[in-house]
Amino acid sequence: MNEHSETLRAAYDFDAPRRNNNVFDGWRTEVVDEFLARLRPEANVLELGAGAGQGAVYAATQGFAVTAMDLSPANVDLARARGVDARVGDFTDPDFFIGEFDGVFAMNSLLHVAKELFPQVLGIVRRSLRIGGLAVIVVWGGMNYEGTLDDEWTEPARFFAFYSDEDFAKLPTPGFTRVALEFRHDDQEGGLHPQVLTLEAV
C-alpha cells in the first residue's frame, strides 16, 4: 500500500474546489488526442487520478466510453456532477481492479507514487488493460526528487516523485512493449516538463 494515500486524499479533498475550475486544454489535449487516435472508435477507457473530471469529459466528447477513478471523494463528486462515471479508488492498492479496458491514461497522477512502488502500480495498470490495450503515463519531471515541496499550498502537503529524463527512460515496463516516449521541454511548469510514456499491453 501507499503510505501517502491518506494525506493525498485529504490534500485533494482540500484542493477540489480550486481544481474544479481547471481547464483541460493545451498540451494535455494534444497528449490525449494522440493517445485516443491509437484506439479503435468508441473504445472503453479508464482514467487514473481523474481529478474533477475535465479530462474524462474531454475524452468522452471524442466518442469514447470513459470511466474515471480518483483517490479524492470530493473530486469524484465533482466529476459525477459533470456526468462522468467516476469511482473512488486507490490505484496503489494491490487489489485495485475496476475492469479490463482498451486504454488507460494517467495525467500527472503517478507522480505521487513512491519510486519503489512504481513497478507495482504499472502492474495494476497492466491488469486494467486487455492484451493489445494502450496506456499513456504522463508525469512532471526533469529532476530526481522524492518528498514534499517547500512551496506546497495544499493541507496537508502532498508527496511527489520526480524523475530525470534519463531515469524515466530507464524505468522497467514488464507486461508492456514501448510505443513512444516523449519529453515535452517546451511545456514547462515550475521548472518541470511533461514526460509521456505510451505502452502496449502484451
Image (cartoon, rainbow, N blue to C red):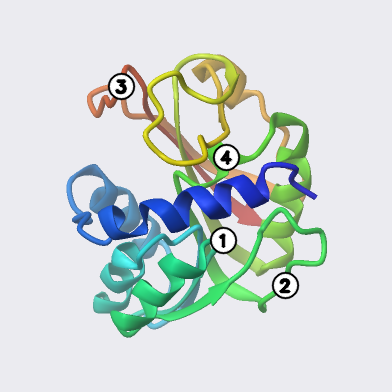
Q: Are marks 3 and 4 in contact (CB under 8 Å)?
A: no
**In front: 192, or 39?**
192
| Amino acid type, callout 3 | Gly
CA–CA distance between discs 4 and 1?
11 Å
CA–CA distance between discs 1 and 3?
24 Å
In the displayed structure image, the side of residue 77 where residue 89 appears, left or right: right
**N-term-proximal mark, 4 vs 1:** 1
Q: Position of residue 31 (x, y in %)?
A: 32, 49
**Label for residue 71?**
1
Which quadrant, please, contains the C terminus? Answer: bottom right
| Amino acid type, callout 1 | Leu
Closer to the observer: label 1 or label 2?
A: 1
Residue 36 to residue 119: above or below: below
Which residue appears at 44% of the width and 18% of the height? Answer: 150
Q: Which residue is mark 4?
A: 112
Which residue appears at 36% of the width and 22% of the height? Answer: 192
Closer to the observer: label 2 or label 4?
A: 4
**Label for residue 42?**
none
CA–CA distance between discs 2 and 4?
19 Å
Give neighbour class at mark 1: few <14, some 14-19, many 20+ (Cα, 10 Å): many
**N-term-proximal mark, 1 vs 3:** 1
Q: Which residue is mark 2?
A: 97
Which element type, helix, strand or loop, lies under badge 2?
Answer: loop
